Image (tube, grey):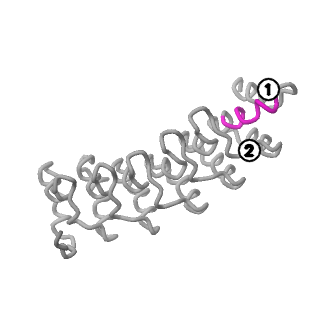
Amino acid sequence: MKRRLLLSAAAWSVTGIAQAQPAALLAAAEAGDITLLQRLLDAGTPVDSRDGRQRTALLLATRANHVDAARLLIERGADVNAKDDQQDSPFLYAGAEGRLQILRLTLAAGADLASTNRFGGTALIPAAHHGHVETVRELLGTRIDVDHVNRLGWTALLEAVILGDGGTAHTAIVGLLVQHGADVNLADAQGVTPLVHAERRGQRAIAEILRRAPRRPVTPG
């Protein structure tokens, strides 16, 4: 309650309204304060106001998983692809951290499926790494590149095996990736395939999925 009063005071201060509105919008988004967000936006505060780290109000709402705040900001025209100084956007962050409801909102608002994070990965790769099964399923329902390779030389399939724990979630993700045409022949920068990585890590269920997966013809280098 105290925080909300402080935010309101900052937003509607007669002497400092021009300076306070963007800061108040960011704070309201981070707090999930829908009422204050609406008032600030109605007063003309730029919806894509940024903080010192170049984070927009929508990115702050996404980080805090405030779905209603994110929905309001998107309805008011917030850029779902706007990146901060760490190359995170609302779309990329929602994918990486399994913010499924917000991810769906960003997809409906024109998320750039080819956009990449600071590691050169699409939203699908960290989603696979972190074991977010439903997020991976949602992304695979789009035209996202299932075989995109990041700067580490890893695809979503490689990352699910190398950085995953081999448990139920990562096994399900490997299955989904294979079902959606992931190339099981694509090796890492050292020439190690997902199957070999799975075998080395004792990920038996994943290794079995990979053994049974259809294999594309290997094109001579």
Could you tell me which secondary element the residue under label 1 belongs to? Answer: helix
Give the image quarter of residue 136. bottom left
| Callout 2 secondary element | loop
**Which region of the structure is painted magenta?**
17-26
Whichever of labels 2 and 1 marks the residue nearer the N terminus, that label is 1
Q: Are marks 2 and 1 in contact (CB under 8 Å)?
A: no
Q: Residue at coordinates 65% horizontally, 48% vertically from top-left?
A: 68
Seen at 27% across and 46% down, the residue is 163
| Classed neighbour count for the residue bearing mark 2: other residues with Cα under 10 Å, few (<14), some (14–19), many (≥20) | some
- Residue 116: x and y in percent read 44, 53
> Residue 18: image x %, image y %?
81, 33
The CA span between labels 2 and 1 is 19 Å
The image quadrant of residue 147 is bottom left
Q: Which residue is mark 1?
A: 9
Q: Is residue 83 left or right of residue 148?
A: right
- Percent coordinates x, y for residue 104 in the rendering: 54, 58
**Residue 114 at what x, y percent from top left?**
46, 60
The C terminus sits in image quarter: bottom left
Instruction: Name the residue carrying label 2.
Output: 46
Frontmost of labels 2 and 1 is: 2
Amino acid type at image mark 1: Ala
Residue sitting farthest toward the right: 14
List the single residue furthest toward the front. Answer: 221
Q: Quadrant of the N terminus?
A: top right
x 76%, y 26%: residue: 5
Q: Main secondary structure of the magenta part?
A: helix
